[in-house]
Image (cartoon, rainbow, N blue to C red):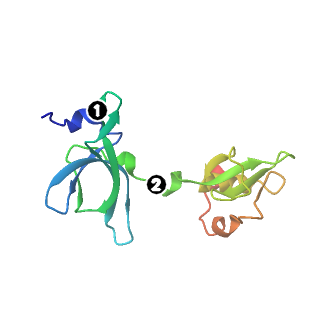
Amino acid sequence: MQEYDAAAAHWGDGPLVEVALPDGQTVRAVVTPRRRDRSGTWWYDYELTLPGRVDTARGPIQQPYVVCGCAPYPIVKPIEGQDYTALDPPPPEKRTRWRVDETREGRRLVHRLDCAAGSEGGSLTTDADALRLLAQGPEVATTCAVCRPEAVLRTLPLPPEESL
């Protein structure tokens, strides 16, 4: 009988975690994103590589099968020595929440990321950069009338004056 070498199969990209199965076994999986819920509990999305088989004209061959799941800590536990910081979202000041398109007249139009009126090719920008752009006046930049980003932007603190 051939042994299955999970390490040789495919771990995927990302750090490893230990996943506790309902029957008490522990397996290693690749964690993709992680996030905290409102209570502060970490939730981990993971990919678990299992042995699998594909039938071919020459007979069955071994092929890894990836199962995706999501569970909170302590069902999914970090492994000492693994770097999970790349999975964390950027700090609020570096998050891109706005898309900036250029109109035919050369003005900039600021949209929410999920705005249907925004183009796929627009550039992404942070809160501070969107505020700096809009501070230049309506002849340079304005907000989208469909998604109305000013409803959120007006609640944000202004960036330092020297950067405006």
Q: Position of residue 11 (x, y in %)?
A: 29, 39
Q: Is residue 69 above or below residue 52?
A: below
Circle 1 SS class: strand
Give how far across and how far down residue 47 sits, in percent: 33, 49
For label 1, the residue is 61
Residue 9: image tag: none
Kindly identify the residue that appears in the image at 69 percent across and 57 percent down. 111
Residue 162 visible, this angle: no
- Residue located 52% across and 55% down the image: 93
Asked where in the image residue 35 lies, by quadrant, the reply is bottom left
Disc 2: which residue = 91
Q: Mark 2 falls on what kind of element?
A: loop
Q: Nearer the viewer, residue 99 or 22?
A: 22
What residue is shown at x 74% (from left), y 48% (from top)?
101
Residue type at mark 2: give it: Pro
User: x, y percentage for residue 76?
Assistant: 25, 57
Farthest residue toward the bottom? 39
Residue 55 appears in the rendering = yes
- Residue 37 falls in which quadrant of the image? bottom left
**Which three-letter amino acid code belongs to the residue tagged 1?**
Ile
Measured along the vertical axis of the image, is residue 67 above or below residue 21?
above
Which image quarter holds the N terminus? top left
Q: Residue furthest top?
A: 58
- Left or right, 13 with respect to 106, comes to left
The disc, 1 or 2, on the residue closer to the chain's N-terminal end is 1
Confirm or deny contact between disc 1 and disc 2 (CB under 8 A). no
